[in-house]
């Protein structure tokens, strides 16, 4: 079974919840063994009331995030005007080349790392950032997506809230990035 980014996130969140339940059970069992079941239940109830009371003082910030899709990326142009041999073609390797001025290199690397989180959130199986040794101003971002259809869905997952980071990234480069799409050939699925 091949897990993509969201599948792995779901798996690890379930793992964390189950681990927290097990650890909490052990902790409350130790409290009950030491002070008695009645005292343990009173402490748990007091903790629940205190946690609820904290909600009156510790409010979550009023932050609105625009999650509407922002599909601004053009689809790749094919020589024969036909997409790869089916939606299940893959995996797909996408490379993005950036020309970065030396004075912006550190800021660019930090921004691209944050951008990598967006790529992984949108189901990139692998993500990487490389610097060209022959042309030090060239940085290459790579990510792999499980199929061509999944890559097309990535275009729809980019939100307007992500746009700010992308615009910041583009202010740190010269020109426009060069994007290449490559589909794996000769692999058994």
Image (tube, rainbow, N blue to C red):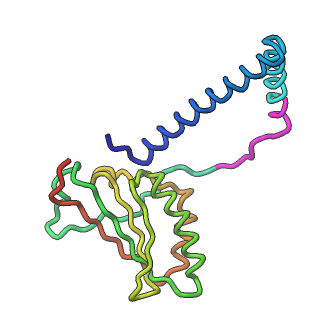
Corner quadrant of residue 28: top right
Which residue does the image show at 72% across and 26% down from the upper left?
A: 27
Quarter holding the N terminus is top left
Find residue 148 and report its image quarter: bottom left
Q: Position of residue 97 (x, y in %)?
A: 39, 76
In the rendered image, residue 142, in percent from the top left (x then y), is placed at 39, 67
Decide if residue 102 is on the left or right side of residue 47.
left
Q: Residue furthest top?
A: 38
> In the image, is residue 188 above or below residue 43?
below
Residue 6, image x and y in percent? 45, 44
Q: Is residue 66 magenta?
A: no
The residue at the point 50 percent across, 57 percent down is: 118
Indicate whether 99 appears above or below 182: below
Vertical order, 84 against 174 (above or below)? above
Residue sitting at the far front: 34
Residue 56, position as x, y percentages in the image: 84, 34
Tell me if 124 is positioned left or right of 85 in this view.
Answer: right
Say left or right for 29 vs 8.
Answer: right
The residue lying toward the viewer, choosing from 164 and 6, is 6
Q: Does the magenta stretch include residue 58?
A: yes
Task: From the viewer's side, name the closer residue of 15 and 96.
Answer: 15
- For the point 50% across and 80% down, which residue is it? 173
The stretch of residues the image draws in magenta is 53-64
Q: Is residue 82 left or right of residue 168?
A: left
* Residue 3 quadrant: top left
Q: In this view, does 169 lie above or below 116?
A: below
Number of callouts: 0
Q: Which residue is drawn at 34% across and 55% down?
A: 145
């Amino acid at each position: 079974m091949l897990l993509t980014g969201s599948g792995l996130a779901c798996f690890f969140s379930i793992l964390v919840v189950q681990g927290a339940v097990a650890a909490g059970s052990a902790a409350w069992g130790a409290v009950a063994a030491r002070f008695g079941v009645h005292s343990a239940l009173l402490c748990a109830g007091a903790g629940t009331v205190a946690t609820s009371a904290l909600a009156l003082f510790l409010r979550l910030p009023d932050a609105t995030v625009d999650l509407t899709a922002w599909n601004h990326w053009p689809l790749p142009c094919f020589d024969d005007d036909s997409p790869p041999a089916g939606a299940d073609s893959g995996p797909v390797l996408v490379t993005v080349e950036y020309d970065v001025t030396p004075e912006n290199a550190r800021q660019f690397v930090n921004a691209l790392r944050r951008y990598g989180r967006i790529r992984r959130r949108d189901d990139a199986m692998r993500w990487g950032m490389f610097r060209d040794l022959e042309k030090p101003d060239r940085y290459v971002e790579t990510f792999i997506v499980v199929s061509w259809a999944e890559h097309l869905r990535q275009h729809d997952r980019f939100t307007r809230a992500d746009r700010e980071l992308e615009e910041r990234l583009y202010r740190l480069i010269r020109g426009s990035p060069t994007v290449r799409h490559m589909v794996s050939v000769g692999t058994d699925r």
